[in-house]
């Protein structure tokens, strides 16, 4: 289950080393206040129960979708099956943009843009995990967003006609009409979500060998072309 | 499909390019004509993509004898009881009604490459500007001593879609308690490298439930096979003591069968069996050979366009080709079809042509919720379709991952059949 985890962690570390992220762990007390945005759905601490969302005790080190007694979206359950484990890196990516990490999650939260806010909330949640061994106290390694993309990569205007040809390779598995049994839908994603997700596979941060391989051979322009094509697909 | 701005621009570009291209074809016919022989993984996909993307600018005819295509993929899951036969059948109705493809239910019996026509068994012939052949495989006579097509009722191959798989399953179900099932596995290269071993797994799954003391004997002319470590691990875990695999080092290549007596002879040793599955050596579908496009058993192609190396007006897809590193699979045929469709449109209407990209993934089911997969990406080089990168499931994976892999294969099946038949 965890066979992809060490790899993605090492790569994330490589990215982070050059990314210049703040190297302090977040402020848990500030995080406790920020958690007010989450507490409508999630409980944490003594006696926490599953509610609209799963409880968050023991979150670090838990496989995604891994809590017995909570009914997860198929998207989250699938990512868990494929080896997504919650740690500082993956949680940071998830609360930055939930849908970009887990297609089809039911968590209706837009995400925190500010890396400091994310770090603070995670520092708070960390208090309720018994064994946060995978969270180095002051390591820059654990402080990356899902992928660190240069603004000019996100700014590339994709060529939808090229995207249409490239997309024929995707459609062997991903159905154009948006059906998502067994394999997620990739139709009509916002361009940025699509680009970020593909780069996350390319950097082997997302745990799926077929997608890592497919994304691995695509150039930045080709990823932008696919995003431009799938954005308006009917 | 509505005409949005992007589509409008795309058509305008194609239109202006077409002005400078010869719009009037050789015999004065107004629209270029594409004829596709074989409505399987390669042919149905190619017909659909040419028709869909040319938006009426190309006349597409699909020649296929069957009214419904029964996929070989998932036929092993049917044997194992995980799929219904009815759900493996797909009609050509949408290709005709929604994509305007002229579907002709007949056999192609020959190709006149000078006149550029395809002869039909029912009489008459169909002219083409570009011909796409995707007829799948045929069996090599005499490759398993004692077996011929005449014996396929006693000892089915179940390696083409439809009734053969039903026959094989019925024979497995009818085995006496503690009886023996034998498989003669094929030599390389053949369609679906993991196919025989997924089949062994599914027969074992069925027998474990209905006839747990039954035995499975496999005679294999190869020393090793696709996903071997994964299958052997699964056979040990799920079907311990049931399967006896005899590879070439132990005489598995020295095999003959006696269909009348229901006997299989491996390395001189005669075994009486209750059901037998003989998968003979394979070659390209006969029509390719008749058209004079084979070298040895297969049809060599130009990787970038899937054109025959012997005739630039003919593209050949799927199992029938020799192209390099891609395995003969439905996924591969579907992938090659999209490259060919793009090349054909480029040649006939001047539409944009991009560098060829190919990929393949083959899922196999070992037992309930125990799925594995192998796959790779490929590119076109001068001499062959060359592998770029690949992956394979690992031994010892968690139950969750194996279950997710199986569920993914169901998604793939829905995806590829929608991609073939619309
Ligand atoms: C048991 C089994 C399991 C498999 N599992 C998988 C799997 O899980 N995944 C995967 O990707 N692949 C799988 N395959 C392989 C896959 O079925 C083939 O590789 C694929 O069908 C090849 O496509 P094709 O277009 O070359 O031929 P086909 O799909 O066989 O299509 C050929 C068509 O041409 C028609 N035809 C032949 N000759 C003529 C003629 N003269 N005139 C007109 N029509 C003609 C035939 O009727 C047929 O419909 C499996 C195969 C088997 C046997």
Image (cartoon, coloured by chain):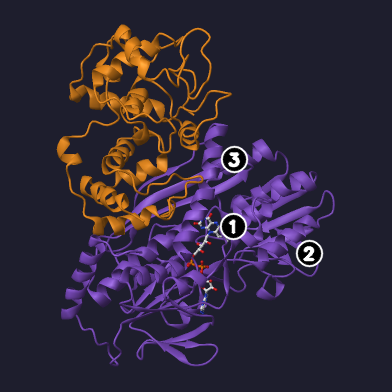
Chain colours: A orange, B purple
Q: Which residue is mark 3?
A: B370
Chain ID, mark 1: B
Residue at 33% across / 11% down in the picture?
A33
Whether residue B329 is visible, yes or no, is no
| Residue closer to the observer: B416 or A99 | A99
| Whether residue A227 is situated above or below residue B146 in the rendered picture | above
Quarter residue B321 falls in:
bottom left
Which is in the foreground here, disc 3 or disc 2? 3
Q: Position of residue A127 (x, y in %)?
A: 40, 8
Q: Which residue is mark 2?
A: B262
Counting residues from the start of the chain, the first of labels 3 and 2 encountered is 2
Counting residues from the start of the chain, the first of labels 1 and 3 encountered is 1
Q: Residue furthest front?
A: A40
Tag 1, which secondary structure?
Answer: loop
Counting residues from the start of the chain, the first of labels 2 and 1 encountered is 1
Which is in the foreground here, disc 1 or disc 3? 3
Chain ID, mark 3: B
Asked if ligand 1 lies within 8 A of label 1, the reply is no
Chain ID, mark 2: B
Q: Position of residue A220 (x, y in %)?
A: 22, 45
Quadrant that contains the C terminus of chain A? bottom left
Q: Is residue B170 left or right of residue A204?
A: right
| Whether residue A144 is situated above or below residue A189 in the rendered picture | above
Q: Position of residue B179 (x, y in %)?
A: 81, 52
Asked if ligand 1 lies within 8 A of label 3, the reply is no
| Whether residue B364 is situated above or below residue B138 in the rendered picture | above
Distance between the alpha carbons at the discs numbered 3 and 2: 33 Å
Tag 3, which secondary structure?
Answer: strand
Whether residue B53 is visible, yes or no, is yes
Q: Which residue is mark 1?
A: B221
Are tags 1 and 3 found on a single chain?
A: yes
């Amino acid at each position: 289950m965890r066979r992809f985890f060490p790899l993605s962690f090492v790569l994330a570390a490589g990215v982070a080393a050059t990314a210049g992220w703040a190297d302090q762990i977040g402020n848990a007390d500030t995080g406790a206040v920020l958690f007010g945005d989450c507490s409508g759905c999630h409980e944490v601490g003594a006696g926490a129960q599953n509610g609209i969302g799963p409880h968050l005790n023991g979150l670090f080190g838990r496989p995604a979708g891994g809590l017995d007694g909570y009914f997860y979206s198929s998207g989250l359950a699938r990512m868990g099956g494929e080896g997504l484990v919650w740690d500082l890196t993956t949680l940071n990516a998830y609360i930055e943009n939930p849908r970009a990490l887990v297609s089809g999650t039911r968590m209706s939260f837009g995400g925190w843009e500010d890396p400091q806010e994310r770090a603070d909330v995670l520092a708070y949640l960390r208090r309720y995990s018994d064994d946060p061994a995978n969270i180095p106290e002051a390591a820059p390694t654990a402080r990356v967003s899902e992928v660190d993309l240069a603004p000019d990569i996100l700014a590339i205007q994709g060529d939808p006609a090229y995207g249409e040809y490239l997309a024929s390779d995707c459609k062997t598995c991903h159905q154009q009409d948006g059906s998502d049994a067994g394999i997620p839908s990739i139709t009509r994603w916002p361009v940025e979500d699509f680009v970020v997700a593909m780069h996350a596979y390319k950097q082997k941060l997302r745990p799926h060998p077929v997608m890592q391989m497919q994304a691995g051979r695509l150039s930045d322009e080709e990823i932008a072309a696919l995003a431009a094509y799938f954005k308006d697909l009917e | 499909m509505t005409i949005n701005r992007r589509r409008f621009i795309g058509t305008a570009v194609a239109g202006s390019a077409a002005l400078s291209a010869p719009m009037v074809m050789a015999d004065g016919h107004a629209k270029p004509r594409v004829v596709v022989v074989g409505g399987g993984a390669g042919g149905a996909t190619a017909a659909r993509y040419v028709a869909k993307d040319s938006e009426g600018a190309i006349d597409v005819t699909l020649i296929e004898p069957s009214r419904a295509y029964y996929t070989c993929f998932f036929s092993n899951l049917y044997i194992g009881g995980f799929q219904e036969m009815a759900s493996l059948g797909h009609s050509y109705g949408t290709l005709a009604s929604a994509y305007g493809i002229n579907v002709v239910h007949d056999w192609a019996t020959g190709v006149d490459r000078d006149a550029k026509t395809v002869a039909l068994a029912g009489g008459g012939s169909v002219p083409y500007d570009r011909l796409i052949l995707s007829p799948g495989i045929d069996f090599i006579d005499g490759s398993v001593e004692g077996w011929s097509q005449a014996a396929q009722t006693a000892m089915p191959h179940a390696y083409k879609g439809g009734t053969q798989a039903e026959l094989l399953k019925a024979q497995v179900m009818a085995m006496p308690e503690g009886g023996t099932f034998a498989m003669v596995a094929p030599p390389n290269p053949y369609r679906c490298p993991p196919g025989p071993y997924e089949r062994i797994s599914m027969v074992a799954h069925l027998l474990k439930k209905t006839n747990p003391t039954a035995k499975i004997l496999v005679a294999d002319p190869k020393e090793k096979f696709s996903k071997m470590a994964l299958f052997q691990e699964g056979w040990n875990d799920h079907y311990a003591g049931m399967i006896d695999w005899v590879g070439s080092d132990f005489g598995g290549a020295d095999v003959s069968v006696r269909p009348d007596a229901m006997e299989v002879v491996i390395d001189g040793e005669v075994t009486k069996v209750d059901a037998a599955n003989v998968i003979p050596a394979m070659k390209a579908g006969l029509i390719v050979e008749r058209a004079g496009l084979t070298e040895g058993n297969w049809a060599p192609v130009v990787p970038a366009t899937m054109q025959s190396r012997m005739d630039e007006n003919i593209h050949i897809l799927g199992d029938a080709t020799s192209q390099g590193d891609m395995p003969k699979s439905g996924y591969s045929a579907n992938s090659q079809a999209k490259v060919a469709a793009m090349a054909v449109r480029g040649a006939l209407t001047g539409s944009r042509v991009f560098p060829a990209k190919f990929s393949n993934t083959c899922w196999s089911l070992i037992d309930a919720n125990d799925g594995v997969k192998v796959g790779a990406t490929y590119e076109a080089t001068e001499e062959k379709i060359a592998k770029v990168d690949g992956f394979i499931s690992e031994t010892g994976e968690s139950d969750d991952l194996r279950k997710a892999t199986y569920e993914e294969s169901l998604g793939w099946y829905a995806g590829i059949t929608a991609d073939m038949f619309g």
